[in-house]
Amino acid sequence: AAIRREDYRPPGWTVPDITLDFRLDPAETQVHATLSVVRRGAHDEPLRLDGAGQVPLSVKVDGVAINDWRIEGEQLVVPLAGDAHRVETEVVIAPDRNTQLMGLYASGGNLCTQCEAEGFRRITFFPDRPDVLSVYRVRMTAEARRFPVLLANGDPVASGTNEDGTHWAEWHDPFPKPSYLFALVAGDLAVHRGSFTTMSGRAVQLGIWVRAADLPKTDHALHALRLAMAWDERVYGREYDLDVFNIVAVDDFNFGAMENKGLNIFNSRYILADPDTATDYDYDAIAAVVAHEYFHNWSGNRITCRDWFQLSLKEGFTVYRDQCFSADQGSAAVKRIEDVRGLRASQFPEDSGPLAHPVRPESYIEISNFYTATIYNKGAELIRMMATMLGPVKFRAATDLYFDRFDGTAATCEDFVACMEEAGGIDLTQFRLWYAQAGTPRVSVGLAHEPGGGRATLRLAQHVPATPGQSVKHPMVLPLKIRLFGAETGRALTDETLILLDQLSETITFEGVTERPVLSINRGFSAPVVIESDRTAADLAFLSAHDDDAFARYEAMQQLMLDTLVAGTINGVVQADAVLDAVARTLEAEGLEPAFLAEAVLLPSENFIGDQMMTVDPDAIHAAREELRERLGRTLEPVWRRLYAEMAQDAYIHTPDAKGRRRLRNVALGYIAASGAPDAAATALAQFDAADNMTDRQAALTTLVNSDAPEREDALARFHARYADNALVLDKWFQTQALSSRADTGAVVARLARHPDFTLTNPNRARALVGAFGVNQRAFNAADGSGYRFLADQLIALDRLNPQTAAKLLPPLGRWRRFDGERSRLMRAELTRIVETPGLSKDLFEQASKSIE
Ligand code: ARG
Ligand code: ZN
């Protein structure tokens, strides 16, 4: 049964206040809820409360037990005579049997909650929809010895102990909020405290709660939190609004983290870091997620979503905000490159596959399936395009207007766009198509030059491919930043200009262009589109050396590599010269930061090469890419060795520059290994042993794991032994093997699934092995279908425990249209087997059935 956007109706009853009383116990938790309910408008509908998996032990109205309530589907229906009542329910739930990790559940002996999107109904009966905003009072009672810490949203108001070994605490959150932002935590936790003084001078007590042994790993997260609080004041004028801000880290979590008001709950992988166990990538991800969840306090909590079709209102905007925050902490160009790489790896395939959906979807079966790269990352690109079109001053005026006008409400994407229009003084009528049309626009460009008249003519045409349910598409507004460079002199021939392509095709002429121009287009990735240009390898090489936009420079190199690899895959012969030349030049160029160099010389992934092809031939892609890697390794071996030596550092420090040097050094190590140099494994093993940080150790391990060197098994065994009691590092051990480029990876992964440390009950562990294997294009697409069967087996098993996490791992099977007949048939057979599994969740059913169509 699909939920449709057009069916939205405002709630018939509101709940201005709720009081929750918990008697917490892992096996049997009693929940007593008292709701003040108010009829909205004139109607005679009963009160309908969502509740999943429980029956009420009692229902009272205005203090009197009633028995004319009934259960309809998953709702408790309570007939009410007047316009305002007090409704009380009591239920008993079992957190320790909650393997879905939605609602109240146990993790590592502690109790915690996850309510977004529809987990609150697994805790108590309530109108579990984001447009019902209530003030929450929460009282928790629990055994004092096992659960010394009791946290909930808002501010603590009172606490005490009882004679029977239990204690209690009461919390009050003055800001009305929807149920998906409710949270509580009970457990044996230690706190790293900090403080922050807001711009108006209010002192906020910060706390990061973890198990005591992990306290030394919380500095980075706390530091990032303070930076994020200051950044939101400076850049958006947004101040924190409670006296306390708590973050709790838990090991079992379905995704990254959750922005519950005043009590963020995090997957521990996005909090815990020290040099020995976390990579530079982990450090950056921690800062980004801490900032993301903090920023939600305004873009999400103070202003929430009217319904779940508006999810990108908070997620797209908040991702855009966290991307800009991270860009401000180090190199903005490198951050943009990373974000675009991520968009192309996760969102573009979604947009061109069976699960394509608009940024504001029209329908869903299970909302959890819509926490997607489209809602999050394409959504962020939409905000970025509006920011580009408005410019910084008007964009800030527009967000001020939005925060001011919609504070305390549940708003829509339309509300946001209307503010952009009003404060920006522009018409976004056609731009709104970005919210409604799925699919990645493709822009074909051609630049012609008449040397005599000094005129250059740029022809642009756009095409939005059909997506499921949307066969007809309309032209969209594509903001494209362009600039022309002179092929002979290398100098810029024009200023950077922003073109708004809003027709199917357009022609733009430039006068006074005396030398042959080379086109730099979609600079900074100003629009999330695919550019199809007729630029030659020579032009791309030229741009990779001369473009003054760092992103465009990177992009030119990527395109050159991609063209080379696609041709090499099809022809079986890799014409490497242009790439060899361009990479050599880039490595010699003056003034490029190491982190940029590392990005620029990295080859596109096998998946991304596959995404360019009508029919993906995973083995040919792998062979072509390996060949180009080897050629790069061999031809430039002296340069890689020089960089490997030059980029070495004394003791570990965590600064943007030090990170960049580690990155470039490890890229150089990869190319030394690719060259086939006989000492490569020894070099990697020496680095593995000498490393004083996880970035270098894991990079060395990856190099060895991808090799046939005898050192491989030794490194894996020692890595495992050293980190045997660190779950987050063991995830890396599983993941590195699942991503291996070796031919035996399928068999290795099947064996690892039976390893004593493997479990499907922990989402991080499941993703580390099963998730990573699914994106290993070559291994997953083994011609005999063994990879497909393995994934389907794992998903069916995982679905019984945790449907949400299972559904997230399905998309690799949905790529079947892009493979040869036999692989297609094998993939579809597995999708059919999944769909026909008795007792399948609606999460996995929706993803699998949509993927077969
Ligand atoms: N709102 C959270 C965040 O982006 C993520 C919640 C994900 N929920 C889900 N059902 N997948 O910060
Ligand atoms: Zn978010």
Image (cartoon, rainbow, N blue to C red):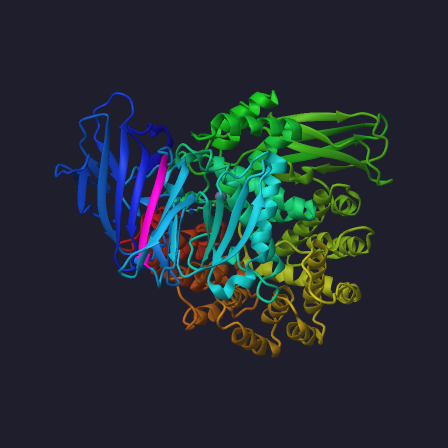
Q: Is residue 9 visible?
A: yes
Magenta portion: prevailing SS class: strand
Residue 141 highlighted magenta (yes or no): yes
Q: Image point 36% across, 60% down: which residue? A: 147
| Magenta segment boundaries in residue numbering | 134-143
Tell which of 736 and 310 is nearer to you: 310
Q: Position of residue 396 (x, y in %)?
A: 61, 30
Q: How many marks?
A: 0
Residue 428 vertical placement versus 235 (above, below): above
Residue 9 highlighted magenta (yes or no): no
Q: Image point 60% across, 52% down: which residue? A: 223
If the image is split into quadrants, where does the C terminus sit?
top left
Residue 428 vertical placement versus 743 (above, below): above
Q: Position of residue 308 (x, y in %)?
A: 40, 37
Tell which of 564 and 592 is nearer to you: 592
Q: Image point 77% across, 34% down: which residue? A: 484
Residue 133 vertical placement versus 705 (above, below): above
In this rendering, position of residue 654 left or right of residue 608:
right
Q: Is residue 379 visible?
A: no
Q: Position of residue 502 (x, y in %)?
A: 60, 26
